[in-house]
Amino acid sequence: MSKIPSMSPSWDTSSFGHPADFSALERSALGDHLVHCGAQRGPLQTLRSGADELQGLLAGRVITSAVVLTLMFGGSWLML
């Protein structure tokens, strides 16, 4: 039976033991990227964000949402 060698995590960084810091070029590129991403947002992104928020709100209150929806649909059916 072969023994599986233990794989201990190895963390390598580019800071070589010094505090990591952004260069001016990296900061500029990040700023350009954020401006570009912000320009891509439109009405569809706003609608999607709103739908995500509504889903999060309803997911936290599944039972209450089901009861309210049932009462709304039941009430509208009785009014017909």
Image (tube, helix red, strand yellow):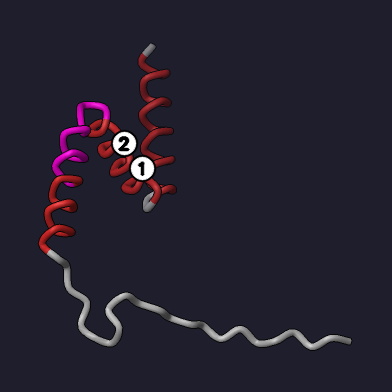
- Give x and y (percent) for residue 52: 32, 41
Q: Which of 29 and 78 is in front in this view?
A: 29
Element type where label 2 sits in the image: helix
Residue in view at x 84 percent, y 86 percent: 2
Judge whether residue 39 is colored magenta: yes
- Give x and y (percent) for residue 13: 35, 77
Vertically, is 15 above or below 56? Answer: below
Magenta stretch bounds: 34-44
Q: How many labels does the image show?
A: 2
Identity of the residue furthest to the top in this view: 80
How packed is label 2: few (under 14 Cα within 10 Å), some, or many (20 or more)? few
Q: Determine contact: label 1, label 2, CB under 8 Å.
A: yes
Labelled disc at residue 51: 2
- Give x and y (percent) for residue 75: 37, 25
Residue in view at x 12 percent, y 53 percent: 28
Q: Say left or right for 46 vs 3.
A: left
How packed is label 1: few (under 14 Cα within 10 Å), some, or many (20 or more)? few
Residue in view at x 79 percent, y 88 percent: 3
Q: Please tell me in which quadrant of the rendered image residue 11 appears.
A: bottom left
Q: Say left or right for 44 vs 55.
A: left
Element type where label 1 sits in the image: helix
Residue in view at x 36 percent, y 42 percent: 55
Vertically, is 47 above or below 8? Answer: above
- Give x and y (percent) for residue 7: 61, 83
Q: How much space separates mark 1 and mark 2, taking CA atoms?
A: 6 Å
Q: Say left or right for 37 vs 13.
A: left
Q: Name the residue under label 1.
A: 55
Judge whether residue 42 is colored magenta: yes
